[in-house]
Image (spheres, rainbow, N blue to C red):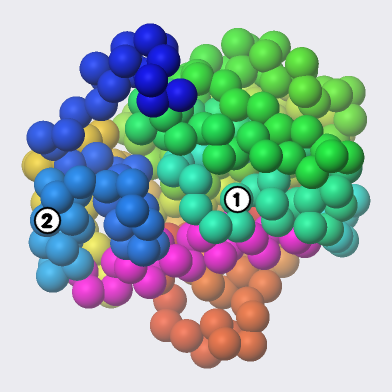
Amino acid sequence: MTDSPAFGELSKRIKTNQPHTARIWNYWLGGKDNYEVDRQAGDQIRRLHPGIGDYALADRQFLGRAVRHLAGEQGIRQFLDVGTGLPTADNTHQVAQQVAPESRVVYVDNDPIVLAHAAALLHSSPEGRTDYLDEDLRNVDSILEQAARTLDLSRPVALMLLGVVIFVEDDQEAYALVRRFMDQLPQGSFLVLSHTVTRPDMPDVDAAVAFWNEHGTPRLTQRTPSSVTRFFDGLELLKPGVVSCNRWHPDDADAESAEVAMFGGVGRKS
């Protein structure tokens, strides 16, 4: 792919002189798809908020636990992962197809860095299928129209929105986008959502986000835990509700760990 004309055009969209959230997240998770500018910004943010790597990891582990629960306990076989981020270990299709090899997954992102590595997301099991869409979260109708090439939208779908609505600054727009997705998905579908939070007892997180918004791209928006819970209005919120990502169906090792500033939940459309 790197020798193709398409990649040449794609590379023009990649800014290597400015830190980027997907690459910094990749750096915190131990990945190699980042540049020196990302590592410098990541280290500066970690100095402001030493626990930042923990909540990057907690968010990734939340994805795994949620997908395993939905595929194993809820019988979900279709996943629409919007705001995919850079491929790492245990991507959505890998987790789902470990439980149910016939699972189908559509990834969606408009980040040229992610698109350049999208091939890593397309190695499906023989029984299942994966696809990748170069689309913006805001283009709900287009995303669903294209996803229908891979997913049967008359059957339940798990909509994965992990750490992506933080890039929608306006509250009403953010809530409306999530509602538009869920309104068009059938009964029995699920919303899996995680979001950076602001809380009085986590002032270092606010400082880290302020630094990021001054130096990096795209800008992040924090919301309170109660504001994150609003994304699940009209859905049946699975226990334990919207909580620190490492407290959602925790493994034994996470059960007593400190809360992180990334909260998440899972809701069912009934």
Residue 81, picture quadrant: top right
Mark 2 is surrounded, within 10 Å at the Cα level, by few (under 14), some (14 to 19) or many (20 or more) other residues, namely few
Image mark for residue 135: none
Q: Magenta stretch mostly in which secondary structure? A: helix
Query: SS for tag 2?
Result: helix
Location of residue 43 in the rendering, given as x and y in whole percent from the top left corner? 15, 63
- In the image, residue 174 lies at what x, y percent? 46, 31
N-terminal of the pair, mark 2 or mark 1, is 2
Q: Residue at x 58, y 62 (%)?
A: 62
Q: Is residue 117 left or right of residue 52?
A: right
Task: Give x and y (percent) for residue 225.
Answer: 45, 58
CA distance for labels 2 and 1: 26 Å
Is residue 121 or residue 226 the one in the foreground? 121
Amino acid type of the residue tagged 1 in the rendering:
Asn
| Chain part drawn in magenta | 49-69
Q: Quick one: SS at disc 1? A: loop
Q: What is the x, y in percent for residue 239? A: 72, 66
Q: Residues within 10 Å of mark 1 (few under 14, many from 20)?
A: some
Q: Return the residue at label 2.
A: 40
Instruction: Classify the position of the C terminus by image quarter.
Output: top right
Q: Is residue 68 magenta?
A: yes
Q: Residue at x 77, y 23 (%)?
A: 150
Residue sitting nearer the eye, 141 or 37: 37
The residue closer to the viewer here, 263 or 163, is 163
Disc assigned to residue 91:
1
Q: Kindly identify the amino acid type of the residue bearing the numbered disc 2.
A: Gln
Question: Would you say residue 121 is visible in this rendering?
Answer: yes
| Residue 136, above or below 248 | above
Image point (24%, 40%), residue name: 20
